[in-house]
Amino acid sequence: MSSRMRFAKASILVAAFLSFLLSVYLWFNGSESQGIFVGIWVPSILSFGALIFAGSSKNE
């Protein structure tokens, strides 16, 4: 696996984790609806990453 691919995968996971942390922060600081909205980003980010890497594995 190339270092560029590793960096891309790590970036997707970090983005999803930061979105999760932000949603938890918002939820527990009184912005429940905003926390739920940001929490919905987590599966969206991971799905986007899966889509990107599924397409890139066909090219190899």
Image (cartoon, grey):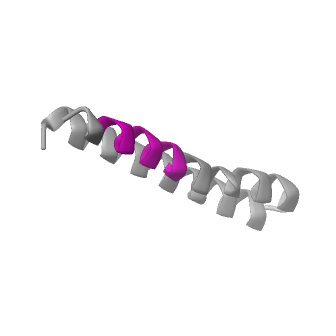
User: Up-down: is 48 above or below 30?
Assistant: above
Residue 55 x, y percent position in the rendering: 37, 37
Q: Is residue 54 magenta?
A: yes
Decide if residue 58 is on the left or right side of residue 47.
left
- Residue positioned most to the bottom: 28
On screen, residue 48 above or below 16: above
Give me the residue at 66% from left, 63% from top. Answer: 24
Residue at coordinates 75% horizontally, 67% vertically from top-left?
Answer: 28
| Residue at x-position 76% and y-position 57% | 35
Residue 8: percent from left, percent from top: 32, 38
The residue at 49%/56% (across/down) is 17
Question: The C terminus lies in which quarter of the figure?
Answer: top left
Which quarter of the picture shows residue 4?
top left
The location of residue 42, given as percent across then percent down, is 59, 54
What's the magenta region? 46-56
Nearer-the-camera pick, 48 or 18: 48
Determine the residue located farthest toward the front in the rendered image. 58
Image quarter hosting the N terminus = top left
Dominant secondary structure, magenta: helix
Q: Toward which corner of the image does residue 54 lie, by quadrant?
A: top left
